[in-house]
Amino acid sequence: MSEKVEKYIACPKCSQQTLSEIVCSVNTENDTGVRDAVFDESIFRWKCKKCGFQTKMIHPLLYNDVKNKFMVYLIPRIDRKKIVDEELELEFSDLSYIKKRVVPDINSMKEKIVIFENNIDDMAVELTKSAVSEVVAKSTSRSVHSGYFMDMDTDKNTITFQYFVGGDHRSYIQTIRLEVYNRSMRIVKKYFSRENKKTGFLNINSSWAENALRKYKNSN
Ligand SMILES: [Zn+2]
């Protein structure tokens, strides 16, 4: 079941406050439509009851995929390193076999969902993404703003990322050989398997990868 809360929300257009229902938690097992609603972002659509103004409103959302054993918790503008909602953490603390992640925006939420649905390791993805972003920065002569996992093809032995580069955040697709990911996977297994088993909601992103690579290099 999807869980909802009622909140007074002030319309950005007419400024009037109305009581609105906000979806705060979804479970893909009971509602197969919620995955689509996240990917087309309709779950974040909000309409003013007074003037009819429509906008996208990013609010906290817990995405629970029981079948694939993961939870992704979207908390907008979350502090990078802070882990999170203590109440929620306690509530799900016995579920250590479930991957739990916290993300700050919709694109990161979609990325985690695709990664975990395909049974891919997100720590290894972040390490790989971080290494490849240096290559992308060099070959484009532009700074890399962000990057997302796109696809893993085990037949072709490739992994593909989409980066956003330069001041205008232009899209840049980079495909590399799967060996780079496999090497990252070995690093994760050797150095970060304990962290991977932590019970809380982890923030596994590019900052985590930078710190992890630093730790890895210092220990070698
Ligand atoms: Zn309005």
Image: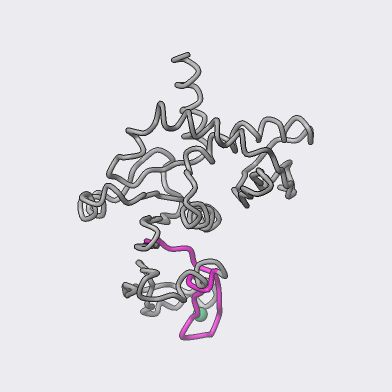
Rendered view: 114 above or below 31: above
What residue is rendered at 65% in x and 49% in y?
A: 155
Quadrant where the N terminus is found in the figure: bottom left
Task: Quadrant for residue 91, please give it.
Answer: bottom left
What residue is rendered at 55% in x and 75% in y?
A: 13
- Which residue is nearer to you in this view: 59 or 113? 113
Residue 98: x percent and y percent?
32, 51
What residue is rendered at 50% in x and 54% in y?
A: 118
Q: How is the image coloured?
A: one colour
The residue range painted magenta reads 41-62
Q: Residue furthest right?
A: 140
Residue 86: x percent and y percent?
24, 49
Residue 53: x percent and y percent?
55, 80
Q: Is residue 56 magenta?
A: yes
Q: Residue furthest front?
A: 155
Residue 191: x percent and y percent?
40, 26
Rendered view: 167 above or below 49: above
Q: How many marks are shown on the rendered structure?
A: 0
On screen, residue 156 versus residue 35, left or right, reads right
Task: Quadrant for residue 6, please give it.
Answer: bottom left
Rendered view: 44 above or below 20: above
- Which residue is nearer to you in this view: 19 or 16? 19
Q: Is residue 59 magenta?
A: yes
What residue is rendered at 42% in x and 56% in y?
A: 74
